[in-house]
Amino acid sequence: MLAHVWPSRYALKNWRVRSRLLLLISIPTLTAVVLGGIRIASSIQSAYASQRVETLASLGQDITVLAQALEDERDQTVFYIAMGASGGRGYGLSANPAVRSSAALQLSVVDRAIGSTDQSAARVRAVAAACWVCAE
């Protein structure tokens, strides 16, 4: 004969209505909270990446201004040398010392805009410093 099987105490049909209702509400709520947290973390990472791109775009613009100032200074130096010691005094670097200070200001802006921990920042800083030394 078949043995009588006692229903398990832990079977869902043997739970109280209050416990089943609590389980029915808590499982989807916890799932939504976990998935929402993952989505929020992903959005925060995306926001940080967008902010980094914006900072690098601004940095690129500052570097372009710096390069232009250095090119202007180089052109003025070449003009001064080409005109000779007597002819180029009025048009050379002594007439416009603001170009050199402008380039120095741009270099300091670039230096502040990029972090010291970024490897590409160190390369940009080295190139900007090399350009500054070449222009002098």
Image (tube, helix red, strand yellow):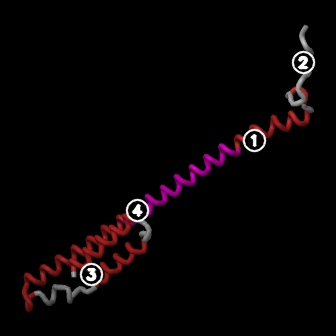
From this view, report whether residue 55 is shown above or below residue 101: above
Q: Which of the marked residues, 4 or 1, is nearer the chain's N terminus? A: 1
Which mark is nearer the camera, 1 or 3? 1
State the extent of the magenta-drawn residues as a range: 33-59
What kind of element bears circle 2?
Answer: loop
- Closer to the eye: label 4 or 1: 1
Q: Dot 3 corresponds to which residue?
A: 99
Residue 12: x and y in percent read 85, 28
The one nearer the camera, 110 or 14, is: 14
Q: Amino acid at mark 2?
A: Val
Question: What mark, if any, has residue 29 been given in the picture?
Answer: 1
- Left or right: 102 with respect to 40? left
Cα separation between marks 2 and 1:
35 Å
Report which residue position mark 2 lands on: 5
Q: Is residue 66 left or right of residue 39?
A: left
Q: Calculate the distance from the C-alpha at mark 2 to the C-alpha at mark 4.
A: 71 Å
| 2 and 4 marks in contact (CB < 8 Å) | no
Residue indicated by mark 4: 56
Dot 4 falls on a residue whose secondary structure is helix
Determine the CA span between mark 1 and mark 3: 64 Å
Q: Earlier in the sequence, mark 2 or mark 4?
A: 2
Judged from the image, the secondary structure of the residue bearing numbered disc 3 is helix
Q: Residue at x 42, y 74 (%)?
A: 112
Dot in front, 4 or 3:
4
C-alpha span from label 4 to label 1: 40 Å
Whether residues under marks 2 and 3 lie with C-beta atoms below 8 angstroms apart, the answer is: no
Which image quadrant is residue 102 in? bottom left
